[in-house]
Image (cartoon, helix red, strand yellow):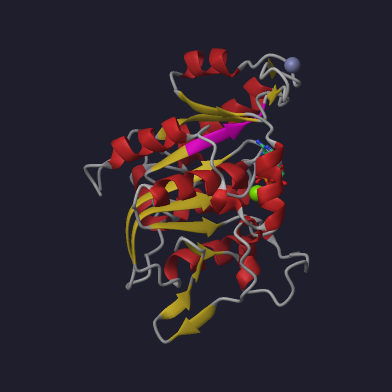
Amino acid sequence: MSEDARGCSNSSCTRESCAGCEHSKESMLEQLNQYSSIKNVIGIVSGKGGVGKSFVTAMLAVLLNRKGYRVGILDADITGPSIPRMFGINEKASANELGLLPELTVNNIKIMSVNLLLDKEDSPVVWRGPILAGTVKQFWTDVVWDELDYLFIDMPPGTGDVPLTVFQSIPLDGIVIVSSPQDLVSMIVKKAYNMAKLMNIPILGYVENMSYVKCPDCGKEIPIFGESKLGEIAEETGVDILGRIPIDPVLASLVDKGEFERFSCDYLSGAAEHIEKMYEKKV
Ligand SMILES: Nc1ncnc2c1ncn2[C@@H]1O[C@H](COP(=O)(O)OP(=O)(O)OP(=O)(O)O)[C@@H](O)[C@H]1O
Ligand SMILES: [Mg+2]
Ligand SMILES: [Zn+2]
């Protein structure tokens, strides 16, 4: 086998320095469940937790579903799964001889999450790294997704071992990086950016969450966490900003009620269109 760009010629390379080299990439990819066919796989990542990654994942999934595509959400955030709750799903996942079956939201978005497997929704997940990563792999290999146009993956937060394994095991077509203005933005966003670059995964763009609050009286936009620096980073890294989401109490209450699918804002409509255009040839 010939050497790749990193000077690696080992066909089963798993060197950390080679993460993302063509060889290691091929050797570590997991096989999709044989009864599934997924056209586009999009990961939602953030350099740190709590910035609204699940929120953005769910919003993009709903918007593409509204456009008439067949959409699924793989909740890869094993220790802090929040996707089923947002959609009011309390049932446990079932299985048949073909594999594990996702649950459906009101509008037929397919969901798989560790919350659908645990007995109690609030039982803490204290598994170690390799088991966490193994569970995520199973959501790829053992779940009968059937046919999907888009699978959105709510990635584990940060840039540690578990996200790295997910990056290596599942063939992502692109990622969206979520940040919020109170982050040490440049450092944290760049971490996520660098990880994607290292793994050769296309970055679709940035989404800034909790960008501002709208005054209920006059509609003025108040940047309560300070002015955004994302514009500078976008320019520096040559990546587009796909959208900005304000802190919106209506959205927060829909999350709490498990009725997120009913939102009517258009903060990410542009992002959804971008994703649709980018992949329309494949769908
Ligand atoms: N723009 C927003 N307006 C109102 N509430 C929001 C907004 N974004 C996020 N929230 C709320 O903030 C909380 C954190 O958001 P979310 O769970 O999506 O973050 P996360 O990045 O997935 O966090 P974690 O790293 O824990 O998985 C949730 O309760 C969510 O409903
Ligand atoms: Mg989350
Ligand atoms: Zn005002």
Residue 260 in the image, given as x and y percentages of width and height: 60, 51
* Horizontal arrangement in the rendering, residue 90 relative to residue 148 (left or right): right
* Horizontal arrangement in the rendering, residue 165 relative to residue 240 (left or right): right
Q: Is residue 179 magenta?
A: yes
The residue shown at (72%, 38%) is 249
Q: Name above or below for residue 103 compared with residue 277.
A: below
Question: Which is more toward the observer, 281 or 23?
Answer: 281
Can residue 144 be seen here? The reply is yes
Count of number-bearing discs = 0
Q: Is residue 254 magenta?
A: no
The stretch of residues the image draws in magenta is 176-180
Q: Name above or below for residue 226 compared with residue 271.
A: above
The residue shown at (51%, 63%) is 106
Residue 17 in the image, given as x and y percentages of width and height: 50, 39
The residue shown at (40%, 47%) is 64
Q: Name above or below for residue 106 compared with residue 247.
A: below
Residue at the extreme front of the image, as rendered: 217
Q: Name above or below for residue 125 compared with residue 162.
A: below
Residue 197 in the image, given as x and y percentages of width and height: 45, 32
Question: Which is more toward the observer, 211 or 3?
Answer: 211
* Horizontal arrangement in the rendering, residue 251 relative to residue 274 (left or right): right
Residue 233 in the image, given as x and y percentages of width and height: 55, 17
Magenta span dominant secondary structure: strand
Image quadrant in which you'd find residue 52: top right
Residue at the extreme bottom of the image, as rendered: 97
Can residue 10 be seen here? The reply is no
The residue shown at (56%, 12%) is 232
Image quadrant in which you'd find residue 145: bottom left
Question: Which is more toward the observer, 7 or 201?
Answer: 201
